[in-house]
Amino acid sequence: MQIKIEAIQIAESFNIKKFRTEFHTEAFSGSTSEVFYAITKTSSYLYVFDYGVVVFANYDPLAKDEFIKIIKNYATTLVDLNLFEEYRIETDVALHKIIVKNDYVIVPQIDPSILRIAMLNTGQSVALEYYEVLTDELITSSKHYILELEKRGKLSISKTNLLKYIGKVLNVKNSIVDNLYILDDPNLVWDHEELDLLNRQLKANFDINTRFKDLDYRLQIVEDNLTLFTDVLNVRESSRLEWIVIILILIEILIALFFHR
């Protein structure tokens, strides 16, 4: 038996509380930030995360498309980047342990807990990819200003646009910080050695921790660049104010000389 897992980044976030209230299917497990469904009628599984990711397992394509239309009603901002990750689970009754491969895992038998762990890590991988895309865009745009400094010795960006850029960077960073829990181990692995091992192996397989550290490092680079840009603009603003003061003083002197003739 083989089960296909598909994780898709659909939005920046979902309103999980409202979704759970209005989606008339009993949840297998869940919290304020995620909800997992084991649909016995179709032997399919569904995992929805508040950071905008939906993970399907053994889902019919038509049913998947229909659900995506439904979940979009609970999204804050839709993501149109075609970000998805696929994984699969295969069964081998002759096995006595779980074996994790690069793009699939082999288990003695399927159960909701194993599916949940595999779907969780697949969903985390997609979420990290989304943040990697965002940080890449920020780094690319900051490189443009760095090259301008190198070639012209000044920045052409206005203070307003710089503040918008700073706001965008902080928004991405805050979003990542808010979703730091995606790296947390689920409660069901705490007292289950086999599931804990599966979870750790999948994290290693998807490079979850390594990618997050790299993401944090790249955001730090962008923040350092922002500090530099802000300092350059502050110098520019100070110089402009100095010239304004000088001009006002000259005007005042000229007026005084004119009236004392």
Image: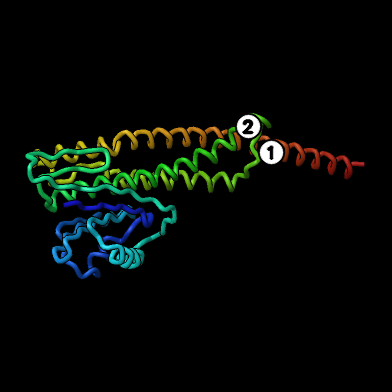
Q: Amino acid at mark 2?
A: Leu
The earlier-in-sequence mark between 1 and 2 is 2
Residue at 34 percent across and 47 percent down: it is 127
Q: Is residue 126 visible?
A: yes
In the picture provided, is 132 more to the left or to the right than 62?
right
Q: Is residue 234 visible?
A: no
Q: Picture coordinates of residue 112 (x, y %)?
A: 13, 53
**At which x and y percent is residue 220?**
43, 34
Image point 49% across, 41% down: which residue?
Answer: 138
Within 10 Å of the Cα at label 2, are there few (<14), some (14-19), or many (20+) other Cα atoms? some
Image point (23%, 43%), residue name: 104
Query: Toward the viewer: 121 or 261?
Result: 121
| Residue at (15, 66) in percent of width and height | 41
Q: In the picture, residue 243 is in which quadrant?
A: top right
Judging by the rendered image, the residue that carries numbered circle 2 is: 149
Return the x and y of residue 86 as percentages of the image width and height.
30, 49
Crowd class of label 1 (few under 14; some 14 to 19; many from 20; radius 10 Å)? few
Q: Which mark is residue 255?
A: none
Residue 88 vertical placement versus 247 (above, below) = below
Residue 49: x %, y % from top left: 28, 54
Mark 1 → mark 2, Cα distance in angstroms:
19 Å
User: Does residue 27 sit above or below 94 in this rendering?
Assistant: below
* Colouring: rainbow
Callout 2: SS: helix
Q: In what element is the residue under mark 1?
A: helix
| Location of residue 56 with respect to 103 vertically, above or below | below
Quarter of the picture holding the C terminus: top right
Identify the residue position indicated by label 1 in the image.
240
Give whichever of 55, 60 is nearer the camera: 60
Amino acid at the residue labelled 1: Arg
